Image: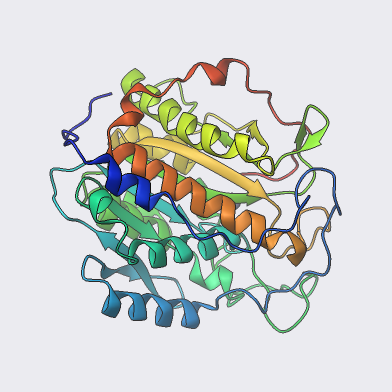
């Protein structure tokens, strides 16, 4: 790919130490054909917007390498935070984006855990060789259910509902082909203050889908896809496939991770395609199983599955950061994409 920066050599010992990621409680048999919807739909265990901000500020105070940036505001005026680890602007840079869709929050929970891990002191060898940007809750209004339309038919217990859309009912992940001045605020600040301001080489756009998607008769823990717009630069596409290779080869052997190929559109309005087209960012869509809340029963996933889905996020972020830092992503084998089965019964949209 047209890598804008050189990957520096790195000591392997630092990376190996970083590999010891703390496991989130992992119920045996949590994935596969276990309890389908997985218990009651609870949002009380999730970070609120406010508790997430508090968490980030605590980590910023603890971690010398971490700097928080407010990239802009939501429709309702919430500050949108980005966590930054930039040791050397010449290093390759990866962006992890969560919650374009407000009802897809376990990826955010995983991203917050990952940020904590980056402060454990085992990561120095990694952070010296890769820059990391994390936007852990782009659609904070939707995540808090603070929107200008009714969520009365949503399923989660308790006072808080989470919805896909921004406060004005717009799908942020269909804005990415517009002139930035015509975008909703959450998408505009992502483009103007992140995509256009930072020299980003890779992005993983983290989502959740419905609960019933499967390949080979087995429910998937998630599905992945590279940019599929035909006008994406071939080198950018190849980088995307390599990013997917790291994720696939990390999760599939775990026994609890089962990864399919997502069936997604070619539209430039989708982040996966738009960021690749407009900014030559190698992108990967990751659609994990089950949403945190929805009006439609087969989309929402109960809390019994929280542990492995959070762990799946942490392993995804951890493995890709390490592969970029040590340069091994450059030689990642992309041939698995040729045989990776497309998932079936995938009612939710990326
Ligand atoms: Zn989504």
Asked if one can make out residue 281 in the rendered structure from this viewpoint, the answer is yes
Q: Is residue 270 left or right of residue 96?
A: right
Q: Is residue 259 left or right of residue 322?
A: right
Q: Nearer the viewer, residue 50 or 79?
A: 50
Residue depicted at x 41% and y 27%: 242
Q: Residue furthest front?
A: 13
Q: Quadrant of the C terminus?
A: top right
Residue depicted at x 52% and y 38%: 250
Q: Nearer the viewer, residue 185 or 243?
A: 243
Residue 216's spot in the image, x, y percent? 79, 26
Residue 118's spot in the image, x, y percent? 35, 61
Q: Nearer the viewer, residue 26 or 59?
A: 26
Asked if one can make out residue 176 in the rendered structure from this viewpoint, the answer is no
Q: Quadrant of residue 271?
A: top left
Q: Quadrant of residue 10?
A: top left
Q: Quadrant of the N terminus?
A: top left
339 vs 57: above or below: above
Coloration of the structure image: rainbow
Residue 152's spot in the image, x, y percent? 77, 75
Q: Quadrant of residue 336?
A: top right
137 vs 347: above or below: below
Residue 165's spot in the image, x, y percent? 59, 61
Residue depicted at x 38% and y 75%: 56
Q: Is residue 20 left or right of residue 151?
A: left
2 vs 315: above or below: above
Q: Nearer the viewer, residue 236 or 148?
A: 236
């Amino acid at each position: 790919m047209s890598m804008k920066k050189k990957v520096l050599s790195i000591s392997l010992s630092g990376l190996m130490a970083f590999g010891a990621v703390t496991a989130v409680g992992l119920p045996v048999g949590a994935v596969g054909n276990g309890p389908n919807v997985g218990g009651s739909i609870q949002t009380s265990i999730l970070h609120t917007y406010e508790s997430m901000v508090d968490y980030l500020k605590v980590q910023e105070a603890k971690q010398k390498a971490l700097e928080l940036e407010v990239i802009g505001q939501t429709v309702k005026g919430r500050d949108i935070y980005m966590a930054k680890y930039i040791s050397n602007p010449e290093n390759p840079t990866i962006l992890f984006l969560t919650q374009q869709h407000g009802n897809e929050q376990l990826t955010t929970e995983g991203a917050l855990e990952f940020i904590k891990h980056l402060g454990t002191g085992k990561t120095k060898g990694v952070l010296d060789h890769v820059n990391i940007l994390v936007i852990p809750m782009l659609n904070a209004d939707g995540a808090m259910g603070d929107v200008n339309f009714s969520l009365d038919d949503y399923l989660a217990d308790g006072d808080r509902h989470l919805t896909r859309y921004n406060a004005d009912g717009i799908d942020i992940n269909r804005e990415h082909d517009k002139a930035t001045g015509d975008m909703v605020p959450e998408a505009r600040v992502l483009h103007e203050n992140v995509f256009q301001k930072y020299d980003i080489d890779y992005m993983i756009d983290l989502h959740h889908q419905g609960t019933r998607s499967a390949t080979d008769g087995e429910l998937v823990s998630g599905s992945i896809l590279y940019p599929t717009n035909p006008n994406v630069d071939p080198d950018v596409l190849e980088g995307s496939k390599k990013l997917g290779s790291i994720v696939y080869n990390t999760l599939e052997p775990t026994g609890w991770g089962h990864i399919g190929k997502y069936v997604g559109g070619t539209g430039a309005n989708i982040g996966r395609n738009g960021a690749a087209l407009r900014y030559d960012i190698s992108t990967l869509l990751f659609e994990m199983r089950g949403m945190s809340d929805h009006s439609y029963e087969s989309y929402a996933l109960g809390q019994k599955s929280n542990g492995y889905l959070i762990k799946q996020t942490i392993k995804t972020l951890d493995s890709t950061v390490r592969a970029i830092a040590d340069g091994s992503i450059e030689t990642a084998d992309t041939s698995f994409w040729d045989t990776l089965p497309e998932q079936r019964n995938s009612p939710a949209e990326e």
